[in-house]
Amino acid sequence: MTRVPEEVPCLLMRGGTSKGAYFLAGDLPAEPAPRDELLLRIMGSPDDRQIDGLGGAHPLTSKVAVISPSADPDADVDYLFLQVVVDRPEVSDRQNCGNILAGVGPFAVERGLVTAGEEETSVRIRMANSGDLATATFPTPGGRVDYTGDAEISGVPGTAAPVVIEFPPSATPLLPTGNVRDEIDGVQVTCVDNGMPTVLIAATSLKVTGYETPRELEGDAALADRLRTIRLAAGRLMGLGDVSDATVPKLTLLAPPRDGGAVTTRTFIPVRCHPSIGVLGAASVAAGLRIEGGVGADLARLDAGGDRVRIEHPTGFLDIESSLGATPDGLPSARRTAVVRTARKIFDGTVFPRSAETAPIPPQPQGGQR
């Protein structure tokens, strides 16, 4: 019988524009069902306010990272991302999270999984959700993680030390449907996956401008219905199966830029409108904008002489270094993807889950667990 701990070592961190609880895999049950039941109690789900746990009553602040040494010779650590649903007893492992990824390298040093360099440290990370790899490089003067610095990212007040995350080319096809464009429910879309399955849609094709606030978009019931229909169909086209209970693919509405960037975005996760944009979602958008004939290519203002793509979002912008190559059969493929994020250690200690006797029992996994 699996022992479920009643107190767990935990490091609470901000990673990019998200916040989450970071755990060593050895401090949690190994089997998915008891692990997820414990995490629901730790985060305070299901409850709109997550008042009895660590969660912050929003998908962006109800995230978990589970870290362990990696058996992959190309990685130092494995990173399993888990999205804890706020208002339902559900935990999903069907996506990566590039924001929480920003804290994985520092966490690995904090917990002794990786020895810090005297000036900076690079940690090779395998994202267990997808098998993709990333390398995070951050300052470690004197062999300790330094979270202070002058790097600034939109959506986070103040500055912090930069965490440079570079992604090698993925084995996943950039165009998972094999098409530059698909038509779903009468709407032209481009389905792209450069680390995050994402559907690119011109905002005007859904009778919105793409400049609305997240609250305005979330209050549009007709838009929500269209997006739900498109997402379910896109999931099947992209080989993801039935995504009715999943948080992928992301849907990103595109409009011409307003503040000097390449494009304006509004992204849904899956029905809440993101106050900014996720790192991997932005990487997929940036790559998608470079695909000739793709949705958004005619809207974007790209710098012909460089790799940087500035993605505008509701609270600012995110810069992605993105360039494309081609597969042997001539389809576009991602060649280089990199981003600068920041992370900060907020709290390191012990979390005490609420009593199992008072917590709802989560349903058994329906094929989402890996």
Image (cartoon, rainbow, N blue to C red):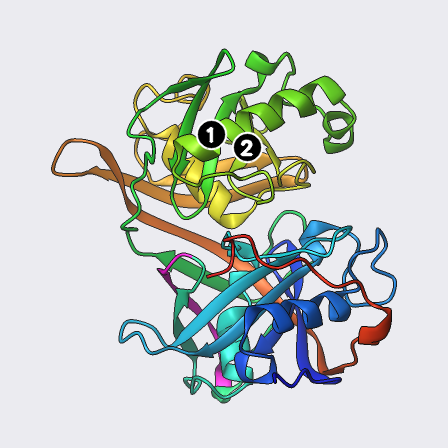
- The one nearer the camera, 170 or 242, is 242
- The residue tagged with tag 2: helix, strand or loop? strand
Determine which of the numbered discs, if any, sits on residue 307 in the image. none
Spatial separation of the CA atoms under disc 2 and disc 1: 10 Å
* 59 shown above or below 20: above
Could you tell me if the residues under marks 2 and 1 are in contact, i.e. CB atoms within 8 Å?
A: yes
Magenta stretch encompasses residue 135: yes
- Residue 208 in the image: state x and y as whole percent: 65, 16
* 2 shown above or below 190: below
Quadrant placement of the N terminus? bottom right
Residue at left offset 70%, top offset 38%: 272
Determine which of the numbered discs, if any, sits on residue 251 in the image. 2
Residue 262 visible (yes or no) = no
Instruction: Report which residue position mark 1 lands on.
Output: 234
Please tell me how crowded label 1 is: few (under 14), some (14-19), or many (20+) other residues with Cα within 10 Å.
Answer: many
Give the residue type that dot 1 points to. Ala
- Residue 124 in the image: state x and y as whole percent: 37, 71
- The one nearer the camera, 237 or 152, is 237
- The residue tagged with tag 1: helix, strand or loop? helix
Q: Nearer the viewer, mark 2 or mark 1?
A: 1
Residue 54 visible (yes or no) = yes
Q: Earlier in the sequence, mark 2 or mark 1?
A: 1
Residue at the extreme left:
328
Residues drawn in magenta: 130-141
Residue at left offset 48%, top offset 55%: 340
Q: How many marks?
A: 2
- The one nearer the camera, 105 or 140, is 105
Please tell me how crowded label 2 is: few (under 14), some (14-19), or many (20+) other residues with Cα within 10 Å.
Answer: many
- The one nearer the camera, 159 or 123, is 123
